[in-house]
Structure formats: C-alpha cells, structure tokens
Image (cartoon, helix red, strand yellow):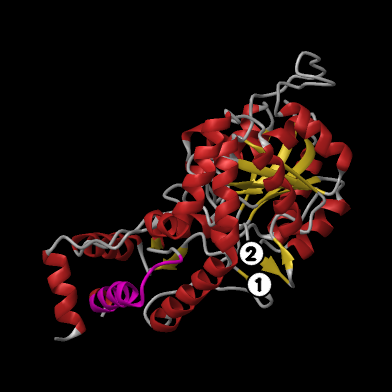
Amino acid sequence: MTLRVLWKIKNIWGFKIKFIDLNIQYKKIQTNIDNDILKILENGDFIFGDKVQELEEKLAKYTNVSECITCASGTDALLIPLIANGISTGDAIFTTNFSFFATTEVISHLGATPIFVDVENDTFNISPELLEVEIKKVLQEGKLTPKAIISVDLFGQLADYNLIEKIAHKYNLFLIEDAAQSFGASINMNKACSFGDVAATSFYPAKPLGCYGDGGAIFTNNKKLANIYRSIRVHGQGKDKYDNVRIGLNSRLDTIQASVLLNKLEIFDNELISRNNIADYYSKNLKKIVQIPLIRKNNISSWAQYSILLDSEKDRNGLAEYLHSKNIPTAVFYKKPFNKLDLYTKQSNKKFNISSKLSKTILSLPMHPYLSKEDQNMVISYIVKYLK
C-alpha cells in the first residue's frame, strides 16, 4: 500500500495533523508532572513554593544570566522593566512593526508612544538600519524623549543584537530583548534572554518552553534592577508584603506552573534538536516552491513557528484554504502590522513596505518537536500539489 493511499485512508478516518501537539509531550513526562503537582496539592505549596526558586536558578544557569525573575506572563515580563524604568507619557519607545500585540501594548499601557520600525525582508526581525533612522527622526522633531528599544526575536530567531546593542549604547537607550518566541535560540553560542539590558520571555503553552497556563520570566545581569523587578511583581513590596515602597503588580508565577516548566526543561534541548531537524526537512523540500525562512550564520532558532512566504495574498489564502480542506491546520502571524491597527492611526501614513507585504503573504505550517516525517511529507506534498 503506497504512502499516498495511507494518507487518504487517514483523512477518511478524520485524521488531522496538529499545529502544535502538547499531548505527546505530556505523555513523555506525565509521571513526573503528575507526581510533582500532587505533592504541591498535598503540601498547599501554591505561591512562591520551592519549585519557583529552583526554576529561576535553572533558567538563569541555562541562559548564562545572573538574575532570573519569574512572573505571571510574558506581557508582564515586558511591562515590569518599563515600569521600573519610569516610562511614561512623552517617552518614545522604538519597536518592530511586525509582532504580537503585547510588544506594543505594554508601551501604550504606560502612556508612552511606540515608534514602529519596519523589519528585515529575510529574517522578519527589526531592521537596525531603519531603527537608527527612526531614532534620529524623533530627536530632530523634539516632541518626544527617546527612552528605550524593544527588539523582538520573531518566530525563534534572534534579532541582530551586534548592531542593535551598538545603537542602543550610542543613543543611551534602554534595550529590552523580547524573547517571548526565542527561548533556547542562540547566536555564536550566546543564548536568547542574554542580550540587552534586560530580556523577557513567555511560557504560554504554545511557546518552545511552555507551561500549562500563563507565565513569563525576566532576565538581567543587573542585581539592583532585578530586586526592583521582584518588588514590582508583588505589589511593590519592600521588606515584607505590607511594606509597599512602589506601585507594583500582582504578577507571580505559581508553583504548579514552575513544576511543569522544570520537567519540560529536562527534555527541552532534545526538543530543540528535533525542531531544527523538522525545520531543515521543510526547507529542503520546499525551497524551490516557496520562500523559506532564512537562518543567519551562527544562529540556532528555537522555531516557535515555521513560516513560508507566498507570492501574493491570493496565493496565501488559497493555499491555506486548500490545506484546511485536507485537515492540515495553518496560521497567519500576523494579519495586521501595528501601523494598520486603528489604535495607531498616527503612524498609518508612514511606509512599512516589508511588514505590509509579510502580513499578506506569510503562512505558518505545523511545527512542534513530535511532528512525524509522515505528517511532514503530507504537508509538503499538498503544498507542492497546490502550487504546481
């Protein structure tokens, strides 16, 4: 019986490839996770239990950063450093025009103004060249005070921190690495979450390292800043929880989520290898059909997404509909760049040629460490069939 016939039989039986398969992963570590959660329930060790401190220590060691501060979400991991830095109305924060909304949302929450920068046409990360152009424009206009840069590691590949860090230093700007999608990635053996003045990551379940709810973490080598972040995440507490020395948040990672992450961290490097093997196989078989992701020299991506580019919006939408008809899920990250949102109409007159094109032509394929070669072959086969 041929592989193609087997695919057809599976489709008749309601077969569907999962975009992200967390169930397979859970089964691999189920016993340890179940036992750990049961102990937490028996001990009532729900908030700031021993597992939280253990996780922070292991994450800091993994990223080779001295301080790790867990919190309730990746969004809070971005927000807390901005609060600590006194960001407010009249401040300009420079960031990518092409990312998940949380990246710009945290800026607007504090009354500051996000200044969007277009992305590179091959990595989809913020363009260092255009970043400096935008900084100079704001300085020349004199209406806002440049304060910080939030650089996103989109889809798992690190941004060009060699250049971005130089720009941040040149203009005395606080640099935040938004590593929500890149935990585990590296460049020249330097891990994600180790760049800039501070880094933020997310443990949302769909992330390369995800928990079973919301969670996030902040990374820095500045102990003074780290202590302020720890204070902010617990209502701005000082010596104890009733000594409030600043306005803060309620943003703690609970002990159950910490235990889940500790178990997942044990298998994370093997999953990272698997993600890269799966991405390589996609690229090898699709490079003559579509534009495949570019991974820069000496970079290792954590492959939060595997995203291809089609020639037009019509081609993208047509392929997505065709794959869905074959029970193959896809996703579009992101349908609207920030400048196209009604919330940011003041920047709608600026040109963002690359992010505008990406939003119309990008399509993300199933990607997780347990995606089988058979399932990949099915995805590839249908893409080739449709486009040829």
On screen, 260 above or below 289? above
- For mark 2, does the 10 Å Cα neighbourhood hold few (<14), some (14 to 19), or many (20 or more) residues? many
Residue 307 x %, y %: 45, 65
Residue 119 x %, y %: 60, 58
At a point 31% along the width and 78% down the height, the residue shown is 377
Mark 2 and 1 residues: CB-CB less than 8 Å, in contact? Answer: yes
On screen, 182 above or below 200? below
Q: Which residues are magenta?
A: 369-385
- Check residue 307 in the rendering and tell me which mark sits there, or answer none: none
Q: Which residue is mark 1?
A: 299
Q: Is 77 on the left-hand or right-hand side of 242? A: left
Magenta span includes 50: no
State which quadrant residue 317 falls in. Answer: bottom left
Residue 54 x %, y %: 70, 46
Real-space CA distance between mark 2 and mark 1, rounded to the nearest whole angstrom: 8 Å
SS at mark 1 in the image? strand
At a point 40% along the width and 57% down the height, the residue shown is 27
SS at mark 2 in the image? loop
- Pick whichever, 92 or 5, lies toward us: 5
Q: Is 319 on the left-hand or right-hand side of 346? A: left
Q: Amino acid at mark 1?
A: Asn
Q: Is residue 370 visible?
A: yes
- Pick whichever, 328 or 373, lies toward us: 373
At a point 25% along the width and 74% down the height, the residue shown is 382
- Check residue 185 in the rendering and tell me which mark sits there, or answer none: 2
State which quadrant residue 326 falls in. Answer: bottom left
Q: Which-is-in-front pick, marks 2 and 1? A: 2
- Pick whichever, 126 or 142, lies toward us: 126
Mark 2 or mark 1: name the one nearer the start of the chain: 2
